[in-house]
Structures are given as structure tokens and as C-alpha cells.
Image (cartoon, rainbow, N blue to C red):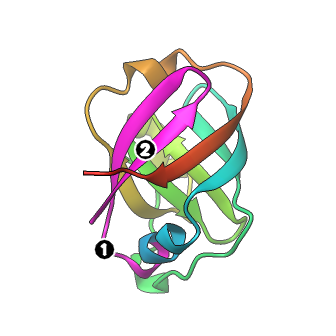
Amino acid sequence: MQPIVMHIGDATISAQLNDTAAAHALCTQLPVVIPMSASSVGICGAAPFELPVDSARIHRGWTNGDINYNPGGGWLAVFFDDEENSQRYGDQFTIGHIEGSIEELRRLTGSYDVTIEARRL
């Protein structure tokens, strides 16, 4: 597991990446800046690189606080709402999860250049 920090506007979000090949591949790209846009359920943007995924672990939906990669579209997303209805969205691959409160994420509006970097312990 790799601890990371995401800088989204004035918000600094701590998270843990999991032990998947996709999460490990993301770590080799850090620090990285990804243009992302906020919606009512999360913040997402096109990753500037492809991440390897185990197709058997691709699933539908998310849990609020998940960091997911969409291998079909190459999107990286941080979800903060609507998990109860998220099963309608397929092609999800979870690579991490936000630590602590997601309330700061729910206040985001607009577009951001999101910096993702390894968190120093």
C-alpha cells in the first residue's frame, strides 16, 4: 500500500493506494498533474498514461471515497457521493481509497489541475 496526497485547488487529500498492478504503475508516474473536473459524484480526468488492470477485478460501482481507474476510457476518478446508485456504472477498477473525511471533496466545483504525489511518512 502506498500513501499518496492529492492537491485539488485549496484541498489537500490523503489517500492509500492498494496493492494492484495499476496502483503500482501509478506510483511510478508520481508526481503527476492531471486536469480533472468535479461533478456531483466525484472528480475525474483522463490519465496521461495507461494503467495495467486485471480484467477479473473490473467491477460496477464504487464506495464513496474510492479512487478508481476506468480502463475503457482511461479515466482516473475520486468518488465522494452516490455509491447507492453507482452500480449502473461499469468498467470500474479500484486502485485506492481516501483516508478520513470526504466532505472537502463534496465542496469542489469546476476544473482543477490535480497534483498527485507520494506522501512522505
Q: Could you tell me what secondary structure mostly forms the magenta stretch?
A: strand
Indicate yes or no whether the magenta region holds residue 8: yes
Q: Which residues are magenta?
A: 1-22
Q: Residue at x 43, y 81 (%)?
A: 21
Image disc number at residue 101: none
Amino acid beneath label 2: Val
Image x and y of residue 3, in percent:
32, 54
Question: Which of marks 2 and 1 precedes in the sequence?
Answer: 2
Tell me the SS state at disc 1.
loop
| Residue neighbourhood size for the residue with mark 1, other residues' Cα within 10 Å, grouped as few (<14), some (14–19), many (≥20) | few
Mark drawn on residue 19: 1
Residue at screen point 74% across, 64% down: 48
Residue 108 appears in which quarter of the rendering? Answer: top right
Secondary element at image label 2: strand
Residue 20 location in percent, x, y? 37, 76
* Depth check, front residue: 90 or 71: 71
The label shown at residue 5 is 2
Q: Note whether 77 is above or below 99 in the view shown.
A: below
Residue 29 picture quarter: bottom right
Quadrant of res 12: top left
Relative to 103, residue 44 above or below: below
